[in-house]
Image (cartoon, rainbow, N blue to C red):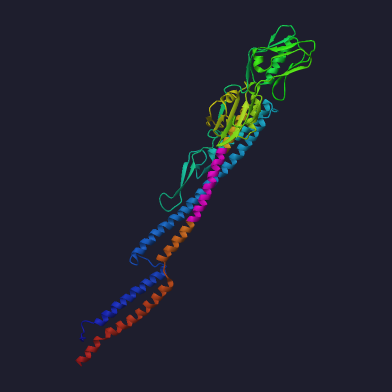
Amino acid sequence: MSSVINTNIFSLVAQRNLNTSQSGLQTSITRLSSGMRINSAADDAAGLAITDRMSAQINGTQQAQRNANDGISLVQTAAGALSSITDNLQRIRTLAVQSTNSTNSASDRAALDQEVQQRLAEVNRLATQTSFNGLNVLDGSMGTANFQVGANAGQTISVNLQQSMTIASIGSVAQTTSATNPLSFTVAALTVQLGAGTAVNVKAGTYNSSADLATAINTAAQTAGFTGNVASVNSAGEIAITNTDPAQTLTVAGADATTLGMAVAAAASGSTTTSTAVASTFSQTLATGDLVLTVNGKATNITGKMNSATDLANAINSSNSGVNAYVDTTGKMHLSSGSSFQISGGTAATLTKLGLPTAATTYATSGSLAQADVKTVNSATLMLSQIDSAIGTVDTLQSTLGAIQNRFQSTISSLSTTTQNLTSARSGVQDTDYAAETANLTKSQILQQAGISMLAQANQLPQQVLKLLQ
């Protein structure tokens, strides 16, 4: 190599290597002091982009956890109010059951209704005033609430709060009234005659039971001069005609008497004739399939011998079918249920005798608790169906909210795991490996010291050329 003074190649080489070691030393000091391997795009452009995306996901999932916790708080607020509403509805139902008891007077039922109305007002207050962060949650105004439970768009959980719990919105029932008086029959031509006396007509009209007709026959017999009762109803629901006066001849006759199976000419004391009319005359024996009530997919058969509309209503009420029944003062039967229900059965003749439609008929729910009361037996009976419907509506929302709360909790657990995994992955890309970086720092420090030493020596080399000039 030429001996020159103007250009010191060795010094340039030493300077370049010293700059390199200085840059490495600076990088190591920055990474060790910040704890991050990537402090700028120059450190790792691709790595910086990856960690930024991961940071966005981590921040998003952490906020999503907070959102889910807010959702749980809202659900718990609504569920607590629904529990109070249920307590009030259960008490109202108890009062309705009490009001249907015949031992209560009108004033008793009025007193019961006062508490019922106060309880209904409390249900309404809870429905309209239960709120979370200023938002009403039980009056239907919130609609469908969407909770962002993920870091990205579309990752939501929806809570349907469109169902209002006000008394004007719950307690709808399905109901119908029999077209005619069930198990009734018409008598037009029936007479009672004592001996050779004038025949007395039995009052023509519609009778709701064999007992009603027996009473009419006795009234006519007494008008004709007979002492005591001549007609009675046996355990089978049939009418028995008995002559208890040996000195008299008792005759019950007429076209309808023959039809009803009661054509009687009793001459001897104690002579008894029992009607032999078919079941549909005075009563109706229902076998499986003759009358079927279907509520929420559950079919219930009403069976047994029914001597009157009251017997039929009692059989329906004791069947646990979900349908309530009562007979009004005109003899018609009213059916109601908290859910839509269907009436079906066997022959058209049987259903007609029961005053029910001959074809399978479904009745939908309507109405509410807004006008409900327990002031009469009939209104209290109807209210039982209304309360059952209201409780069912509340229970449905409670079940939904309970499931949503469990889902929120599961989501929070999943988000926590996701955050942990993302943070760990980001750490692998972004964070400083102190074991490796301290080794790099030590190397850079040694190279820095060596570079300074070599640069000093390289700068002294031109001095050697001066010796050639001596």
- Towards the viewer: 216 or 438: 216
Image side of residue 408 versus residue 387, left or right: left
Quarter the N terminus occupies: bottom left
Using the rendered view, name the quadrant where residue 434 is placed.
bottom left
Magenta span main SS:
helix
Is 391 located above or below residue 352 in the figure?
Answer: below
**Residue segment shown in magenta:** 392-414
| Residue under the point 54% across and 41% down | 396
| Residue under the point 58% across and 30% down | 336
| Residue under the point 51% across and 53% down | 410
- Towards the viewer: 204 or 238: 238
- Towards the viewer: 106 or 329: 329
Q: Residue 185, image x and y in percent?
A: 63, 19
Magenta stretch encompasses residue 27: no
Q: Residue 382, image x and y in percent?
A: 60, 30
Is 69 located above or below residue 274 in the figure?
Answer: below
Is 437 located above or below residue 124 in the figure?
Answer: below
Q: Residue 427, image x and y in percent?
A: 43, 65
Is 41 located above or below residue 310 in the figure?
Answer: below
> Can I make out residue 376 in this image?
no
Quarter the C terminus occupies: bottom left
